[in-house]
Image: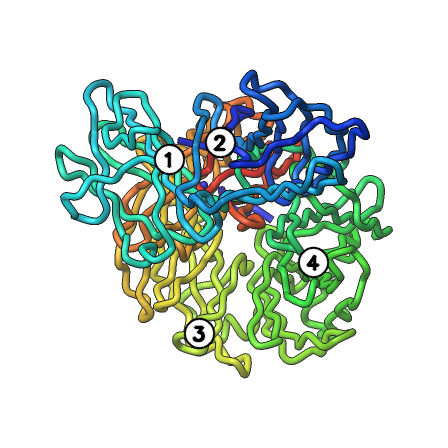
Amino acid sequence: MNGKIALPRFRGDASFRVLLVFAGAMLFMSANNPEIVFVNKTPWQVHIVAGSGRTDVCDIAPMGRFTVKNLWAVGEVCYPVFDVSLTETFSLKNLRPADRDFYIPVGGSLKEQRIEINIPAGFNDTAAYILMTNGAKSGGIFLSRNDSQNLMTSIDSAEGKTTVNSGETLVYRINSTDITKVKALTIRPGNISGSVDFRQGYVYQVLFDGSSLSVEDARPLTRMGEKGWVRNVAGADTTIQVVGNTGGHIGVFSSHINAGLESCYFQSGGEFSEAATRRLANFSITGAVGSGDNTVIVLGYLDKGSLGFMPVLQRQYESGGLIADLAPSRRRDIPSAYFLAAAEEDGVLLAVGGADSGVNNAGDYKAYIRAVREDTAAFTPLWEIGPDAFDAAAGGRGKCGATVSVIFDKTRDRWLAAGQTIEYDNMRNPVPGSYIAEINREGDIVRIDFSLRGFLVNKITRDGQGALYLAGEEAGSGENYALMIKLDGDGKTVWRTRNRPLANSFYQDVLFDEEGRQLVLAGTLGAWDSNGTGGMPFIEGVDAESGEFVWRETFGGRNFYGTALVTGIAKAPFYGLVLALSGIADGNFVPPFMTARVNSRGKL
């Protein structure tokens, strides 16, 4: 799209029920009917039932409490039943903790009683748990750790089952002392293995499909049952920006140009809570970066009509309170400019975008970079690189269009900025290509790589070893194909992967998942044209080492609330991902602008 200014999944309401006896604890009826206070100290819904008939007593919300009169006969016993939602089709029952010392103390029958309900010792946040589903059409399978011949025993059956029959799900526990030792699970017969990086307090939903073993979801025990969601950002006129891990919430930033407003929201559980609205006419937000200390950098531009664009950089608290604005550039040779992306390192923020000499149209804006230091209440300008400096560094080898993405490479102590080149053939048709500019800390352009011909870059990221990943599209012969390129630190190609067979697809954003050693990519799939019109929003995982395809999720075919493209990805609080989506018309991003919360495999 030339010139454009995520284990079976955890779904639904079915419950994971854990049944525990109040061992040796009896509640006696007395003449005074003393009160009993049940205190739920778990993150789960708890039901209190009494007697062999399991008579309902009360429901207690997570971290809540409930007071009842003691009306039970001598010898009756109460049970707490825990609801931990897992999937729509699977529910554990009658799980008893392995720790026989787990008892809930109950006082004498003639006095007030306070009963605290804690997470059972046999199901706690120091172990890791596996929900193993046999999705093969026939036959039973066995699970073992690493390449051991010893079969694992489920914890959700009285007889300690080892066989997982077709269509069945069993639950296994890996104790805290063994978590660092277990690096893979193996299915027998067949010795089919899959690697897993286990963490304490996490539940892993694992699927065997008959030929391979895959982790379909991983999330903290305390986040069981949370559903994915999709929400419309009402009134937004430009692409929304999402920032994850903002104090346990999701930050959503949007422009309302027609209303002359800029808004930022918190989003938790899919619900919006407006944090701030600021009057700022004709302002388009193009990026947002979490900057620590409960602050966010918001960037974009003001449309000043015939006077062009003025780049905007704001630092604000997550609650929306403005801390600092960036003063406009005073360079006369840059009458119009805009910001598209930013990155920071050691208190220095690099904002990148496009600048105009006054004679080009917006589609031909050239590379522009501005560096500032983030002080407590202000941005301190450091250095600025305009189109003339890029032209000089290029030495006639090419022209650098607007810079669309930037990162800091710690392995070589340098900034890397990427964008699309400006080149036309004899018929004034654009010739697709991209560049990567290497810039030192002092703001000097060290070199520019113009070797990425036929490729349109939309986003650049890196891993901890210095490898670079470029997401975009391969353009040519009237059809575009989503393309991911991995480069080593010297700029040499390690691998290239294409999203065939669907034409007119592209990647708009990429996120490196350090834990999963995978790249999470998002964009549009199988559009009607190379601009993305009528495409399907999608997200997929690619192995970072080999470039091999791992998984993919498309959203609603060609009618996902009117959206056609995933414009942005961010890590969501606690687990999973948050997405920004938009429609596409005539090569432009158009409403509806929406957000979605998905798990680590892209499932809602």
Looking at the image, residue 487 lies above or below residue 25: below
**Element at label 2:** loop
**Element at label 3:** loop
Residue name at image x 28 percent, y 60 percent: 493
* Kind of residue at badge 3: Lys
Instruction: Identify the residue position indicated by label 1 in the image.
Output: 131
User: Quick one: which residue is furthest to the right in this view?
Assistant: 279
Measuring from the top left, give residue 192's x and y in whole percent.
Answer: 18, 38
State the mark number for residue 298.
Answer: 4
In front of the other: 358 or 600: 600
State the mark number for residue 86.
Answer: 2
* Kind of residue at badge 4: Val
Mark 3, Cα crowd under 10 Å, few <14 / some 14-19 / many 20+, is some
Q: Is residue 427 visible?
A: no
Residue name at image x 35 percent, y 68 percent: 465
Instruction: Identify the residue position indicated by label 3 in the image.
Output: 410
Residue name at image x 79 percent, y 54 percent: 304
Q: Earlier in the sequence, mark 2 or mark 1?
A: 2
